[in-house]
Amino acid sequence: MKKVINKRAQESMSMPFGIIFSIFLIVVFIVTAFIAVKYFLGISDTTKIGLFYQDFQSAVDDAVTSQSTNTTFKINLPSEIKKVCFANLTSEITSPDNYDEIRDYYTYQANTFLLPSSSAGGLSSKQINHLNITKITSAKNPYRILASGEIKIIKNFYDRDVVVK
């Protein structure tokens, strides 16, 4: 004797499974889209930091090649970066605020730091050439500038390197 299977019961069970599976796929696509957008925004911030270092180095190089200059450099960094620091890690630290974030860079050749370093990713420090870091940090080491402002680039006629304020 054959058992008769009720096909109506199967049809009613397949419809909710299809709906649940569709909802699951929609949620997965939405979560994936948010992750992708966050990733690309992170790349944008990293690019901004890299361009800041490149443009700042170019501005310093331009100042070095001129006889004397007193220009300003507009800081264009992500909003998470609060300060740009210039530090001479080989001399005495006279301003210990935020020093714990840059003290690990003794082994690197760096004189420019972005704070907080966790917001800068892997680009939190950089060696900017032609900076008179000894003169910049003579009063405060590290010397900090708010990232929402400007950096004054100063080079006098007899100076070899640039001073920032």
Image (tube, rainbow, N blue to C red):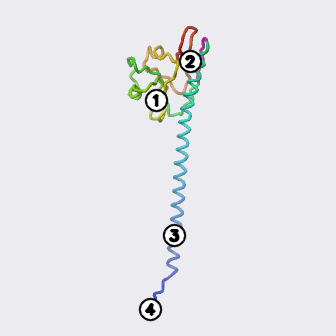
The label nearer to you, 3 versus 4, is: 4
For the N terminus, give its image quadrant.
bottom left
Residue at screen point 46% across, 89% down: 2
Earlier residue among tags 4 and 1:
4
Give the residue at mark 2. Answer: 153
* Helix, strand or loop under label 4: loop
Q: Which residues are magenta?
A: 67-73
Number of marks: 4
User: Is there CB contact under 8 Å for labels 4 and 2?
Assistant: no
Cα distance in 3D space between marks 1 and 2: 20 Å
Earlier residue among tags 4 and 2:
4
Q: How packed is label 2: few (under 14 Cα within 10 Å), some, or many (20 or more)? A: many
* Residue 94 shown in magenta: no
In percent of width and height, residue 135 lies at 47, 13
Earlier residue among tags 1 and 2:
1
**Could you say which disc has been placed on residue 115 in the image?**
1
* Residue 70 shown in magenta: yes
In percent of width and height, residue 118 lies at 44, 35
What amino acid type should be assigned to the residue bearing mark 1? Leu
Give the residue at mark 3. Answer: 16
The label nearer to you, 4 versus 1, is: 4
Cα distance in 3D space between marks 3 and 2: 68 Å
Earlier residue among tags 1 and 3:
3
Cα distance in 3D space between marks 1 and 3: 52 Å
